[in-house]
């Protein structure tokens, strides 16, 4: 009976709007809302002039993902200027020069350094070790091709370029180099095909459009 009376008393007291307002911890009486009868906001409860409540900062946007090889190649194929093409070439070269092996990356870098120092024999030895270590790394075979071209060892150069293109068919530099060697040895038809494929990938390869025009006249008997 006492429990029932107590419950009724709570309902009477706390069931009134004023009581509910008094009990709401998330919406306390303040200067902009009236409290229950007889309630007065404590002095100083108003916000001082110029004061603003802190707001939650928006989360930082995630850093954009770098473009993929496919995206860079797609942009290069429709480049509008030589500067744009050169920038895309550099980014692709950086991407292609990274293997899945830190040792291979070091060997490639040292082989390049040896070539710059006019030490082709050392460069060749390093490049051979590179392709032995990572035979599926296209840029390792391209490095061997560059060294072979420098040494005028065109048979080895063609072999290395074919390895490069088997692993990276859209390597436009290797295509242009292969075309140049084939043209040098009179295989104009296949040279023209390699040149055209390279130009489709990169419309700003120096001198390639002129070579295509000349070979087209030779192979097909007409100008373009």
Image (cartoon, rainbow, N blue to C red):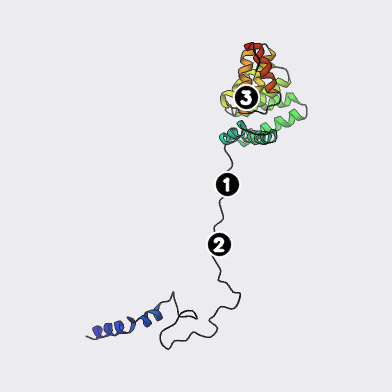
- Looking at the image, residue 183 lies above or below residue 111: above
**Residue 73's quadrant in the figure?**
top right
Q: Which mark is residue 57?
A: 2
Q: Is residue 149 left or right of residue 171?
A: right
* Mark 3: few/some/many CA within 10 Å (<14, 14-19, 20+): many
- Looking at the image, residue 183 lies above or below residue 113: above
The residue where tag 3 is placed is 198
Q: Which mark is residue 64?
A: 1
Q: Which mark is residue 8?
A: none
Disc 1 to disc 2, C-alpha distance: 20 Å
Secondary structure type for disc 2: loop
Q: Residue at x 76, y 26 (%)?
A: 119
Q: Residue at x 63, y 23 (%)?
A: 175
Secondary structure type for disc 3: helix
* Mark 1: few/some/many CA within 10 Å (<14, 14-19, 20+): few
- Asked whether the viewer can see residue 143, the reply is yes
């Amino acid at each position: 009976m006492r429990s029932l009376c107590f419950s009724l008393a709570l309902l009477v007291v706390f069931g009134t709007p004023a009581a509910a307002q008094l009990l709401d911890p998330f919406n306390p009486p303040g200067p902009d809302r009236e409290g229950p009868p007889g309630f007065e906001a404590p002095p100083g409860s108003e916000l001082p002039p110029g004061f603003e409540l802190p707001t939650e900062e928006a989360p930082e946007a995630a850093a954009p993902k770098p473009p993929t090889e496919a995206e860079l190649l797609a942009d290069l194929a429709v480049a509008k200027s030589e500067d744009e093409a050169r920038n895309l070439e550099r980014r692709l070269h950086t991407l292609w020069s990274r293997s899945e092996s830190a040792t291979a990356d070091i060997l490639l870098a040292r082989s390049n350094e040896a070539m710059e120092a006019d030490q082709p024999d050392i460069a060749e030895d390093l490049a051979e070790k590179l392709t032995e270590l990572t035979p599926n790394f296209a840029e390792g075979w391209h490095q061997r091709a560059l060294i072979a071209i420098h040494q005028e060892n065109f048979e080895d150069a063609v072999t290395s370029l074919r390895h490069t293109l088997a692993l990276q068919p859209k390597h436009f530099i290797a295509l242009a180099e292969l075309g140049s060697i084939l043209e040098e040895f009179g295989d104009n038809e296949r040279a023209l095909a390699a040149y055209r494929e390279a130009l489709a990938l990169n419309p700003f390869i120096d001198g390639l459009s002129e070579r295509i025009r000349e070979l087209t006249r030779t192979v097909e008997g007409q100008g373009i």
